[in-house]
Image: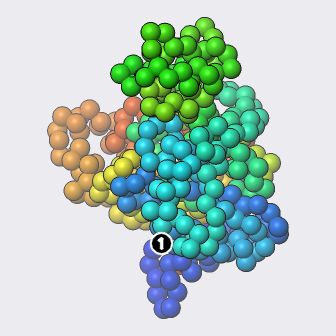
Amino acid sequence: MEKAKVYFTNLRTKGEESLLQKLERLMKKAGFEEIDFKDKFVAVKIHFGEPGNLAYLRPNWARTVCDYIKKLGGKPFLTDCNTLYVGGRKNAIDHLDSAYVNGYNPLATGVQTIIADGLRGLDERELPVPGGTYCKTAKIGSALAEADIVISMSHVKGHVSAGFGGVLKNIGMGGGSRSGKQAMHSDGTPRVIEERCVGCRTCEKNCAHEGIKVVDRKARINEDKCLGCGRCIAVCPKDAIQTKWDSGKEALSCKIAEYTWAIINGKPNFHIAFVMDVSPDCDCDGQNDLPIVPDVGIFAGFDPVAVDQACADAVNAQSINEGSVLGDILRDSRKRAERQKMIDDKDVFRMLHPNTAWAAGLEHGEKLGMGTREYELITMN
């Protein structure tokens, strides 16, 4: 496979051009107008940010992308799926409230915000994963699965489970329905937090396989019958049923790649990644820490694997911010010794989260035929 073209611009401006205008110019240079948007439903996949987190992408960026799509005749909408864990984005009502608080409302963005997997995270489509090793099919939020075109806007950062949060993480994990996220994060059945369970039988009534029963006013998982679909997680009113988070880190990264492939395979797709405010952890957290490296710029292209690789390379090439958590690790002789290999490899994401395997996802993406890690970086001033 020949090298993919990845387009890049820094965050400097001069003259009368704003950063938002510069973003549109970068997209045009990267070939955005080659996509036929006329009368097409366009899912703009983005992370709205957990309430309390301030590192997420500003809605101004999304407004620029969506206005450009509309100018080209498309029908864009901003979208994400509900979370598997408890928080401000677990159901569509809370999720929309969180998005609006963070500025993602139609007045600010000019488009509608649609939670792709519906009210409880149960609105999904099962899509094939061509060549999948870990997943033969993927459970994807319906609005995202039904879109004609997929455009991703990703904030690059660290992640406690995936190591690196970029395009694949944004589309693959973010695009999975509640049961899809359960399948990616766990290799088995969910678990019951007994102190939260009130024996209401909502889980039991919603299980089609008799995989969960209430005994002595507490829900019990039947390991022989449970399919691990995650429906009980979605419907429990007390958040008493949760995933085990027991998927191996390499397997998780590969599953994320397979879910990404299920979503974009056969559809026009384009990817924009912002290497700024590179926080040590995901925008899913209800807080964010000091960025680990200085801001770099914006990357764009048609190949999601190449864009992720270019972003990771750019972050790894930066100096580490002195007062960040990475700076703390380098100053701590014991921690520095524990992570010396990652330091030697200049892999800041594994310096942060040494038990992760982010590169495995990009390697797997290559094997699937989704893209290539080899890229030509084309810089736009």
Quarter where residue 295 is shown: bottom left
Q: How is the image coloured?
A: rainbow
Q: Secondary structure at mark 1?
A: loop
Q: Which residue: 67% across, 75% down?
A: 68
- Residue drawn at the location 60% of the way across and 14% of the way down: 211
Q: Nearer the viewer, residue 28 or 229?
A: 229
Residue 238 at x, y percent in the picture: 44, 31
Seen from the viewer's position, the closer of residues 219 and 189 is 219
Percent position (x, y) of residue 347?
40, 44
Quadrant of res 21 = bottom right
Residue sitting nearer the eye, 376 or 293:
293
- Residue 10 in the image, given as x and y percentages of width and height: 47, 72
- Position of residue 11 in the picture relative to residue 380 (left or right): left
Provide the residue designation for mark 1: 10
Furthest-bottom residue in this view: 15
Residue shown at the point (75%, 72%) measured from the top left: 33
Residue 103 or residue 267, whichever sits in front: 103
> With 33 as the anchor, is 329 left or right in this view?
left
Mark 1 closeness class: few <14, some 14–19, many ≥20 residues within 10 Å: some
Can residue 183 be seen here? The reply is no
Among the 4 quarters of the image, the one containing residue 315: bottom left
